[in-house]
Image (cartoon, helix red, strand yellow):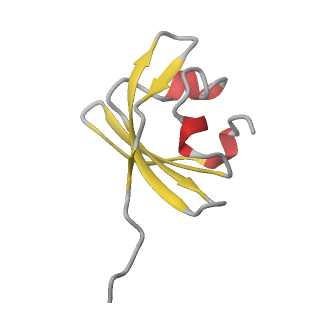
Amino acid sequence: MAFAIAGLSLLQHANGWSMWHYTTTDTIATVNTAAYFTGDAVNMLQVRDLVIVTDTNAPTTSFCNVLSNDGTTVDVSDGTTVVETDGD
C-alpha cells in the first residue's frame, strides 16, 4: 500500500523538533523504504523528527526518526519495534 496522509498526525512540536504518529496497514519494512513518505509529508517531516508507526495489521508499533529530507524524498530509520508482549 502507498503512503496515506490521513494516517499522519502531529503529536508534539517544540524547539524545531516534532513527534508524529502514523497509522497504516503497511509493515515497518515498507514504511522505512526511502521515498515512502511522499506528497505533503515531504513538507512536514524534518530531519531528526520522531515518527511512531503503528501497523494495524500485525499489530506492531515502531519508533523511527527522519534521517533525511531533500525536498522530494524522505527517508526514515529502520525503526525500533516496541515489544508488545506481557509475560505475566
Examine the rendered structure and indicate whether residue 4 appears above or below residue 42. below
Q: Return the residue found at the far right.
A: 1
> Considering depth in this image, is 75 or 38 the residue closer to the camera?
75
On the image, the x and y values in percent for residue 3 come to 68, 35
Which x, y percent locates residue 83?
37, 64
36 shown above or below 61 = above
Q: Identify the residue shown where x is 54% and y is 43%.
A: 28
Residue at image position (52%, 11%) is 71
| The residue positioned farthest toward the front in the image shown | 87
Q: Residue furthest bottom?
A: 88
Residue at the spot 55% in from the left edge and 38% down from the top edge:
29
Lateral position of residue 54 relative to residue 20, left or right: right
Total residue callouts: 0
Residue occupying the point 56% across, 27% down: 33
Q: Quadrant of the N terminus?
A: top right
Left/right of residue 49 with respect to residue 75 in the rendered view: left
Q: What is the quadrant of the C terminus in the image?
A: bottom left
- Quadrant position of residue 87: bottom left
Residue 16 sits in quarter: top left
Residue 65 vs residue 11, the one in the foreground: 65
Residue 12 in the image, given as x and y percentages of width and height = 37, 48
- Residue 33 versus residue 87 in the image, above or below: above
The x, y position of residue 50, in whole percent, is 37, 40
Along the line of sight, which residue is nearer the eye, 9 or 79? 79
Does residue 41 appear to the left or right of 57 in the view shown? left
